[in-house]
Amino acid sequence: MEIPFNPARLIESALLEAAADCGLPGDDFAPQVRPADPRFGDYQANGVLPFAKKAKRNPREIATQLIGAMQARQILDPNLVEWEIAGPGFINFTLLPAFSHAWLQAFSCRADLQAGAGTRLKGHRHVVDYSSPNTAKEMHVGHIRSTVIGECLARLLAFSGAEVIRDNHIGDWGTQFGMLIWAIKETGYDLYARESARTVADLEALYKQGNAAYRESEEKAAAIRAELVKLQQGDGENLRIWKSITDVSWKAFDEIYQRLGIRFDEVLGESFYRDKVGRVWEELRDCGLAVEDDGALVVFHPEHKRFATQPFIIRKKDGASNYATTDLATVLHRKEHLGADGMTYVVDSRQSDHFEQLFLTVDKWFAATGRDRPEMNHVAFGTILGEDGKPIKTKEGGSVKLRDLLDEAVRRAEVIVREKSPHLDEEETARVARAVGLGAIRYADLSQNRTSDYLFAWDRMLTFEGNTAPYLLYAVARIHSIFRKAEVEPERDFAEADPPQTDEEKALARKLLAFPSTLEMVLGDLRPHVLCTYLFELAGVFSSFYNANRVLGAPPEVRDRRLLLCARTLLILRTGLELLGLETVKRM
Ligand code: ARG
């Protein structure tokens, strides 16, 4: 028998086969196998109830029939899986140690896991639109969420077999460039005189200066508008200045991305679409979606409560394009030129209306023009709050720069690492501090349900107790140390090892086998915290196992059987943390 990566698939296909044997019409019966409450088993099939209801039959009777069919032909080997009917017609399944053992043998390294998981989204091309800061501004704490969640989802999608295109939709076009160019010319500012991060801070100041001048006198306002028009009309010098602003901004952003191990495949900012909006206006008007409203071009959605009257403005009164036009052109480009089957936008929940209107508009536009509609998701997230429960700010009331935040995380982690692990040399201390500090920031963000706001608290994210990065990184290092003491490589072949026997071994094996369904759940509604919770629980189950079952001093066959479980726990913890974007260490 071939062992599927997700054991639920085995149960599903067995139920479908049994259903065919019982003459249940195949199209109507969906087994609906889901992870179960662990007190009752590993999986529960929920599909009998809705089927029985539709067929006006007794669900328990149908469940009994299905089970009878599975037994009669041994569709599922009773030595591998146990099942029983529960309640009005659910069927609970429990994986037996022989099955767990076969699975642990079949998926013995990262490549095996990837091959197993990677069949799910094979052939699906998916754009993840994330991070997306605006140029001429420093990245601040608000950008951490999109960056970290987006990177995690990109990794998860790629692990599940999708061809992922990471696209950073930077805000590099708009009216602010009139003010910036004016201020740069006015002050004679040299964009390349200082390191890029410093330059970006200067650009923020220059923008403020331009903005103040704009409001100061009509004369200056006219000069600023003239700079913007020149830029839009392709004036050589203004384009050069604009380009330099993008270059130095990108350099500063990229320093942060490099620290976080993030690389984008595309950086098609808003400016890329500035000559691609005409077609959007034309098509939307031709298919009757866009209408003139008080001089602007807008889309209404009559079937929607709010958007029936709240317009989606796609061309401003003055004829200029805006954020909405650009996003419509972006969808078209991703569909036509990148061949995207799906797009995920990782953006603040305050932009929910924008994306809802965008998706509704694309639905109708693509339907009217005979294009396949890509799958589109807005992965919204809440605000980061300071310890006072208000949106996080510096002491002076400014926004916290992302660069400073990352520095501080590593600095704080280093103090802790020096205290906890005085045996490490300087180089290792630095490496561990980086893994713990940056990991803590990422994990604190990812482990929260993304739609809620979360409290940014250094002490809480850097503690070794509870659902934190240090706790999980320590769990990984601890398993490495078990292997060092055993003088065995965790990658060793454990083909001769026995199946799990004690209760703790069995519990650990079952938790390990829940990894595939966890990944499916995370992808189902794009919520990384589900993976965090799983890894945290796995580390807990491992601890209980390790405390109750001697590994190192045990007789050889017992030791081997338990080392196999240690090796697979290490593999899944490391793979899971890597998907979250955390770097792990072997020793701490
Ligand atoms: N630059 C935008 C902002 O800072 C985010 C862009 C998100 N992506 C998009 N395709 N709209 O709000």
Image (cartoon, rainbow, N blue to C red):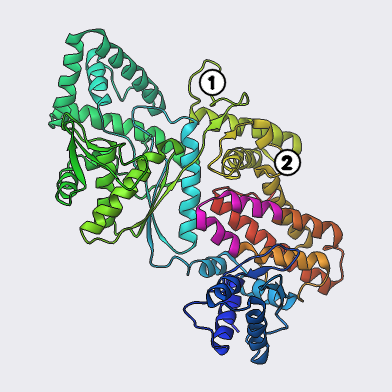
Which residue sits furthest front?
56
x and y, in percent, of residue 374 in the image: 33, 58
CB contact under 8 Å: marks 1 and 2: no
What kind of element bears circle 2? loop
Who comes first in sequence, dot 1 or dot 2? 1
Element on which disc 1 rests: loop
> At 22% across and 57% down in the image, what residue appears?
368
| Tag in front: 1 or 2 | 1
Residue at the spot 73% in from the left edge and 56% down from the top edge? 479
Depicted 31 relative to depicted 358: above or below:
below
Question: Residue 535 lies in magenta, yes or no?
Answer: yes
Q: Is residue 494 visible?
A: no
User: Which percent across, then down, holds residue 255?
Assistant: 43, 36
Ligand 1 image-quadrant field: top left
The crowding category of the residue bearing disc 2, from other C-alpha atoms within 10 Å (few below 14, some 14 to 19, many at least 20), is: some
Residue 383 in the image: x percent, y percent?
Answer: 52, 33
User: Which amino acid does the dot numbered 1 rest on?
Assistant: Thr
Q: Is mark 2 within 8 Å of ligand 1?
A: no
The disc label shown at residue 464, or none: 2
Q: For the residue marked with disc 2, what is the amino acid?
A: Phe
Boundaries of the magenta span: 517-537
- In this view, the residue in front, 80 or 566, is 80
Q: CA distance from mark 1 to mark 2?
A: 26 Å
What residue sits right under mark 1 in the picture?
394
